[in-house]
Image (tube, helix red, strand yellow):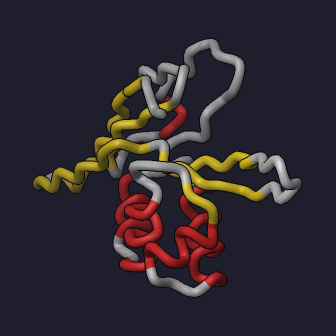
Amino acid sequence: MRSCMSTRSLSTTESRSKYRRPDRQRAQPPTPAAETLLEILGDSYTRRVLQSIIDEPRTCREIIDDADVSKATAYRRLETLKEAGLVESSIKLDLGGNHCEQFQAVIDRVQFQFGEDGFDANVTLEHAGETDDR
């Protein structure tokens, strides 16, 4: 279950290097620029895959069934979402020895704000047991 929340804001003109990283054991990937987020989430297959894992971790087989996408599409979209820092994966251990990878969204909300100077993206992240105050 996800327990900690934080919010990051990015604009089309800001550099990701301006954000400070709090001390922690595991570094989180930087949130992509607003344009990249808009491009990633503008894809309907990506949104379906992400929606499938917002509330609970799922294996790729479960994502394929829930999002109604092909195996190749699911894995491509999951890789894109992982590279963007919006999804994490872990190994699901099975007593029968059939271990498999499961995926979990680490975002709670993405908001885009459009104005005269371009647009901004506000991303609310949730990480179990961690706080990200960027």
Judge left or right: residue 59 versus residue 20. Answer: right
**101 and 45: which is toward the camera:** 101
Q: Position of residue 132 (x, y in %)?
A: 47, 24
Residue lying farthest to the top in this orientation: 23
For image coordinates 22% across by 56% down, the residue present is 118
Quadrant of residue 4 within the rendered picture: top left
**112 and 115: which is toward the camera:** 112
Q: Position of residue 12 (x, y in %)?
A: 34, 51
Which part of the image, by quadrant, shows the C terminus?
top left
Residue 43 vertical placement versus 18 (above, below): below
Residue 64 vertical placement versus 114 (above, below): below
**4 and 40: which is toward the camera:** 4
**65 and 48: which is toward the camera:** 65
Judge left or right: residue 83 versus residue 106. Answer: right
For image coordinates 66% across by 29% down, the residue present is 27
Residue lying farthest to the bottom in this orientation: 70
Quadrant of residue 46 within the rendered picture: bottom left
Residue 87 vertical placement versus 44 (above, below): above
Residue 108 vertical placement versus 70 (above, below): above
For image coordinates 46% across by 32% down, the residue present is 2
Residue lying farthest to the front in this orientation: 96
> Can residue 134 be spotted in the picture?
no
Judge left or right: residue 44 versus residue 49. Answer: left
Q: Position of residue 127 (x, y in %)?
A: 50, 31
